[in-house]
Image (cartoon, helix red, strand yellow):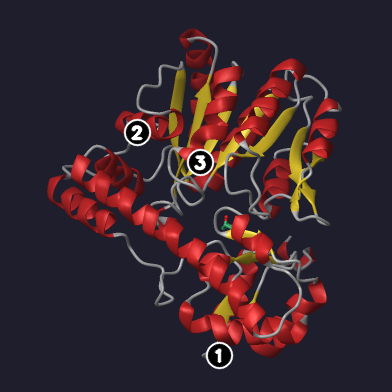
Amino acid sequence: MFEKLEMAPADPILGLTEAYNNDPNPAKINLGVGVYKDETGVTPIMTSVHKAEKIILDTEKSKGYLPISGAPAYGKVVRELLFGADDAYPAATAHTPGGTGALRVAAQFLKKFNPNAAVWVSDPTWANHNGIFGDAGFEVKKYTYYNAEDRNLNFDGMRASMQQIPAGDIIILHACCHNPSGIDPTLDQWKQIAQMINDKKLLPLMDFAYQGLGRGLEEDAEGLRTVAAAVDEVVVCSSFSKNFGLYKERVGAITLKGASADDVNKAFSNLKIIIRRLYSNPPSHGGAIVTTIMNDPALRAEWEGEVAQVRGRIAEMRQLFVDTLKAKGVTQDFSFLTGQCGMFSFSGLNPDQVKTLKEKHSIYIVGSGRINVAGMTKANMDPLCTAVAEVL
Ligand code: LMR
């Protein structure tokens, strides 16, 4: 069978990392995959994470399996991050291998119990949304989101496309730090989105991978909380890769919020069957780190400070990129980058420019022109901007 297969294309994001890793140029710059780098160009382990790992090493008693949905204490802290400390929603959470794992579980669950629905993603969206939901058998359709001309949210267009979505269909929303555009709805726009979801009887799936990297841990949850307050049933897929820096530990979660405890119990029992058949039960370590930090006031305060540092450094790099391009005589206005949220922005670089940056300068950017601002440092800013100015 294998010999009959065609070579598959490289993943548009992780394939780029492979190419970057294989590039011998010592001056190479990776603005592709959404991974945070500190000012020295390293993806650090947070101090709070290190401390939590020491506690786990000293206190862990067994390597026995976790329950199918993971440790209940983990689910509780996840829901606190999502809905706030005083959350009283009927909801249940399963620990998944990363945010991608959460999305794949969600896709399988939704396809099994809502087989005729279509899935609607923002135009543009994270490339893997199409693959994950397509592989689960969904037709994946697009709703209007980005206004390329003005580099902002085309909210009228979004509203108009949402009006066309049939009742019962699934709408995927980026809860904050939209990937790839970096453009989020305002709170008032979220209220209108929530209202439309309710009126149209859509099922919202909130992809929440960047909490804390935009405006703040609480502020970044405002969109999700607005939707959760207005709509009976919500599916949330979380990732702690970025805000805890736990990328390779694969820590994510799927949370089902329902209209009643009874509805949630029924839905969650079915979700557990899906998980059992996909990977049985989650790996423990990353979830234990998140739980340990969240339940220890001193570690939690330290972690919140570290997330604030990450957020601050990204904002600083946005500004420095804009200023450095200007200083290099670039007349094109890039100031839109400073108003955007999270790791990513659409730079406006076209595929040819992206190709030249890679081939001539070993600068790696996703083909759509999405740049990971968190890959910029004070040290690589000058060569980066020289190269960008050259291709513009
Ligand atoms: C990204 O968009 O770069 C990140 O979410 C990493 C990934 O898995 O694609």
- Residue 338: percent from the left, percent from the top? 60, 60
33 lies above or below 208: below
Instruction: Determine contact: label 2, label 1, CB under 8 Å.
Output: no
Q: Is residue 132 visible?
A: yes
Image spot of residue 204 (x, y percent) = 65, 28
Residue named by callout 3:
220
Dot 3 falls on a residue whose secondary structure is helix
Picture disc at residue 77 = 2
Lower position in the chain sequence, tag 2 or tag 3? 2
Helix or strand or loop: what does disc 2 sit on? Answer: helix
The three-letter amino acid code for the residue at tag 1 is: Pro
Mark 1 Cα-neighbour bin, 10 Å: few <14, some 14–19, many ≥20? few
Above/below status of 94 relative to 13: above
User: Is 144 located above or below residue 182 in the figure?
Assistant: above
| Circle nearer the viewer, 2 or 1 | 2
Q: The residue under label 3 is which amino acid type?
A: Asp
Q: Residue 24 has which mark?
A: 1
Q: Earlier in the sequence, mark 3 or mark 1?
A: 1
Residue 273: tell me if it is visible.
no
Q: Residue furthest left?
A: 58
